[in-house]
Amino acid sequence: MDIKIGSVVKGTAGREKGRYFVAVDAHDGFVYIADGKERKLSAPKKKNIKHISPVDACINTDGLTDKKLRQLTRSYLTQADCQKDQ
Protein backbone atom coordinates (compact mmCIF):
# COMPACT_ATOMS: atom_id res chain seq x y z
CA MET A 1 0.00 0.00 0.00
CA ASP A 2 1.41 3.37 -0.98
CA ILE A 3 0.15 6.39 0.91
CA LYS A 4 1.21 9.79 -0.36
CA ILE A 5 1.61 13.01 1.58
CA GLY A 6 -1.74 14.78 1.70
CA SER A 7 -3.80 11.58 1.55
CA VAL A 8 -6.81 11.42 3.84
CA VAL A 9 -6.67 8.22 5.90
CA LYS A 10 -8.86 6.49 8.44
CA GLY A 11 -7.43 4.80 11.51
CA THR A 12 -8.25 1.07 11.65
CA ALA A 13 -6.46 0.11 14.87
CA GLY A 14 -5.45 1.57 18.19
CA ARG A 15 -6.81 4.66 19.87
CA GLU A 16 -7.25 6.32 16.48
CA LYS A 17 -9.64 3.66 15.18
CA GLY A 18 -12.47 5.22 13.18
CA ARG A 19 -10.96 8.72 13.11
CA TYR A 20 -9.83 10.62 10.03
CA PHE A 21 -6.35 12.06 9.57
CA VAL A 22 -4.10 13.49 6.88
CA ALA A 23 -0.76 11.90 6.06
CA VAL A 24 1.90 14.56 6.53
CA ASP A 25 4.99 12.36 6.02
CA ALA A 26 5.92 8.75 5.23
CA HIS A 27 9.10 6.72 5.81
CA ASP A 28 9.97 3.00 5.87
CA GLY A 29 6.48 1.52 6.31
CA PHE A 30 5.32 4.22 8.71
CA VAL A 31 3.08 7.20 8.08
CA TYR A 32 2.98 10.35 10.18
CA ILE A 33 -0.61 11.49 10.62
CA ALA A 34 -2.22 14.63 12.02
CA ASP A 35 -5.78 15.79 12.57
CA GLY A 36 -5.16 19.32 13.87
CA LYS A 37 -6.85 18.64 17.21
CA GLU A 38 -5.16 15.92 19.25
CA ARG A 39 -2.38 15.38 16.74
CA LYS A 40 -1.03 18.74 15.62
CA LEU A 41 0.98 19.30 12.46
CA SER A 42 4.00 20.15 14.63
CA ALA A 43 3.85 16.74 16.39
CA PRO A 44 2.25 14.11 14.13
CA LYS A 45 1.62 10.52 15.23
CA LYS A 46 3.87 7.80 13.82
CA LYS A 47 1.51 5.06 12.64
CA ASN A 48 2.20 1.69 11.04
CA ILE A 49 0.91 1.64 7.48
CA LYS A 50 -0.99 -1.57 8.29
CA HIS A 51 -3.13 0.27 10.83
CA ILE A 52 -4.60 2.90 8.53
CA SER A 53 -6.82 2.80 5.48
CA PRO A 54 -6.66 5.42 2.71
CA VAL A 55 -9.81 7.30 1.75
CA ASP A 56 -10.28 8.33 -1.88
CA ALA A 57 -9.23 11.91 -1.22
CA CYS A 58 -6.08 13.95 -1.25
CA ILE A 59 -5.49 17.53 -0.10
CA ASN A 60 -2.80 20.09 -0.72
CA THR A 61 -0.65 20.42 2.40
CA ASP A 62 1.05 23.69 1.35
CA GLY A 63 0.09 26.38 3.86
CA LEU A 64 -2.05 23.95 5.85
CA THR A 65 -2.77 25.00 9.44
CA ASP A 66 -4.16 23.03 12.36
CA LYS A 67 -7.45 24.95 12.10
CA LYS A 68 -7.92 24.11 8.41
CA LEU A 69 -6.95 20.51 9.12
CA ARG A 70 -9.59 20.23 11.88
CA GLN A 71 -12.24 21.54 9.50
CA LEU A 72 -11.26 19.04 6.80
CA THR A 73 -11.24 16.02 9.09
CA ARG A 74 -14.56 17.10 10.63
CA SER A 75 -16.14 17.30 7.16
CA TYR A 76 -14.97 13.75 6.31
CA LEU A 77 -16.39 12.47 9.58
CA THR A 78 -19.82 14.02 8.91
CA GLN A 79 -19.83 12.69 5.32
CA ALA A 80 -19.09 9.18 6.61
CA ASP A 81 -21.94 9.45 9.15
CA CYS A 82 -24.36 10.52 6.41
CA GLN A 83 -23.37 7.56 4.23
CA LYS A 84 -23.94 5.11 7.12
CA ASP A 85 -27.49 6.44 7.61
CA GLN A 86 -28.46 5.80 3.99
Image (cartoon, rainbow, N blue to C red):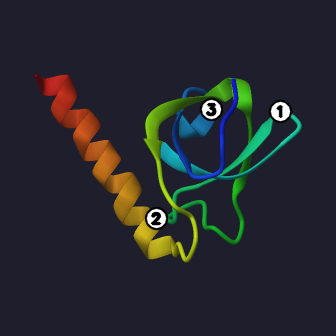
Name the residue furthest left. Answer: 86
Label 1 secondary element = loop
Marks 3 and 1 sit apart, C-alpha to C-alpha, by: 17 Å
Q: Name the residue under label 1.
A: 29
Label 2 secondary element = helix
Q: Which amino acid type is marked by label 1?
A: Gly
- Asked if residue 82 shows in the view, the reply is yes
x, y (%) of residue 46?
A: 76, 47
Q: Do the residues labelled 2 and 3 touch (CB within 8 Å)?
A: no
Judge depth for marks 3 and 1 and give the one in front: 1
Q: Which amino acid type is marked by label 2?
A: Leu
Crowd band around label 3 with a 10 angstrom C-alpha radius: few (<14), some (14–19), many (20+): few
Q: Which residue is drawn at 69% across and 72% down?
A: 42
Q: Which amino acid type is marked by label 3?
A: Gly
Q: Name the residue under label 2.
A: 69
Q: Quadrant of the N terminus?
A: top right
Q: Which residue is drawn at 23% across and 35% down?
A: 81
| Horizontal side of residue 76 vs 9, given as left or right | left
x, y (%) of residue 54?
A: 53, 32
Crowd band around label 2 with a 10 angstrom C-alpha radius: few (<14), some (14–19), many (20+): many
x, y (%) of residue 44?
A: 69, 59
| Horizontal side of residue 57 vs 79, given as left or right | right
Q: Which residue is drawn at 48% across and 55% down?
A: 59
The disc, 2 or 3, on the residue closer to the chain's N-terminal end is 3
- The residue nearer to you, when weighing 24 against 36, is 24
